[in-house]
Image: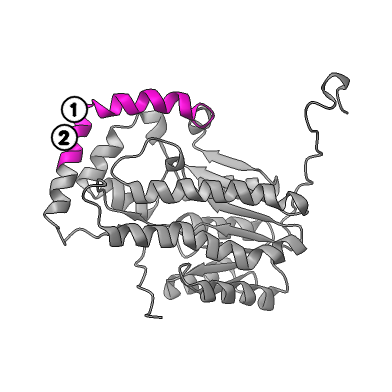
Amino acid sequence: MKLPVLQGILPFRRKPAALHLKGRVALVTGAAQGIGLATAESLADCGARVVLVDVDEQGLGEAAAGIGLLLAHGVRADVRDRDAMAGAVAQAVERFGRLDVVVANAGVTPIPATIRTIDLDDFDRVIAINLTGVVNTVVPAVDEVVAHGGHIVVVASVAAFAPGFGGVAYMASKAAVEQFGRALRIELGITDATAGVAYFGVVDTAMVKNTLDDDPLGHAIDMMMPYPLRRRITAEHAAKVIVDGIANRSARTIAPKGWGPYSLMREVVNRRLEDVLRSDARLREVLLKIEQRNRDADTSVPRVHQARAVPPLPPS
């Protein structure tokens, strides 16, 4: 019921009905491992049929078999390849007759580097997968999702709004994904479909292990974060947050919960935090070591961290 005092001042809209997942069809990228696989499994547990998209053909086969071939179908496709992603959507519709839900999850992160020493090929690759890959996933699928009044989730990160250093490619890509998701949600207001942005802190995946545990400089950066913010969650926890958000048509989901207040106060907190970080002697030392390592071009360190290798695109 509208409050008389507020009528004409604030818009009141009925919350969209919950999205019941039984019998729905979902497409998940980066689905051969980590958050993507856990999300696909959780969706299947809710009665949805799932199309898993990844570049790892063997991992896809194992993941689909683990879920059950009647509920899951694997499609090998690189999110950087626009035609391949359009083909993945077409396969989803051909296999299961419709497409209701999309989870644009695939992503990578480069080794720590300052802007002065970043490898620009690394930067381009991260943007191509993390940002353009989201666009390539959503655009060919959106009309099908709209036709069935479904929901789209783009996976961003708390890196979209926390002060960034040593990983500008990842942070810039996730900030852009956040804005893509916000725009998509507004634009879908003229339809019965909805969209949301998922934000995660540190999720205990192979990519995080490579970036923050196995890399001494990445580990040093991780240890500078206050414990409540660097507390890790499992991929299964992240998947539950995503799937609950789909069912509730949430505009945004965030985990761990400690990042929620930070997100609301981001500008106030970040102004002060940036000044503190600029004068932190420990951070200065780590950044100098990062720059030295990148200038030395240590080829023994993988340039882009991910759970499994992403092959280069063939020449066009």
| Residue range (magenta) | 262-288
Q: Residue at x 45, y 42 (%)?
A: 160
Asked if 254 appears above or below 37 in the picture, the reply is: above
- Residue visible at 42% across and 42% down in the picture: 159
Q: Nearer the viewer, residue 194 or 214?
A: 194
Coordinates of residue 113 in the picture (x, y in percent): 25, 48
Can you say whether 302 is above or below 247 in the image? below
Residue 214 drawn at (x, y percent): 24, 50
Residue 221 at x, y percent in the picture: 27, 38
Q: Secondary structure at mark 2?
A: helix
Q: Which mark is residue 72?
A: none
- As helix, strand or loop, the secondary structure at mark 1 comes to helix
In the rendered image, the quadrant that contains the N terminus is top right
Judge whether residue 278 is colored magenta: yes
Disc 2 and disc 1: Cα gap in Å?
A: 6 Å
Estimate how packed mark 1 is, as few (under 14), some (14 to 19) or many (20 or more) residues with alpha carbons within 10 Å: few
From where the camera sits, is residue 30 visible? no
Which amino acid is tagged 1? Answer: Ala
Q: Pointers 2 and 1 in contact (CB under 8 A)?
A: yes
Residue 281: image tag: 1
Question: Residue type at mark 2?
Answer: Glu
Q: Residue 163: within the magenta?
A: no
- The residue that appears at 75% across and 53% down in the rendered structure is 20
Q: Which residue is mark 2?
A: 285
Q: Is residue 137 left or right of residue 170?
A: right
> How would you classify the magenta stretch by its main secondary structure?
helix
Residue 88 to residue 109: above or below: below
Dot 2 alpha-carbon crowd within 10 angstroms: few under 14, some 14 to 19, many 20 or more:
few
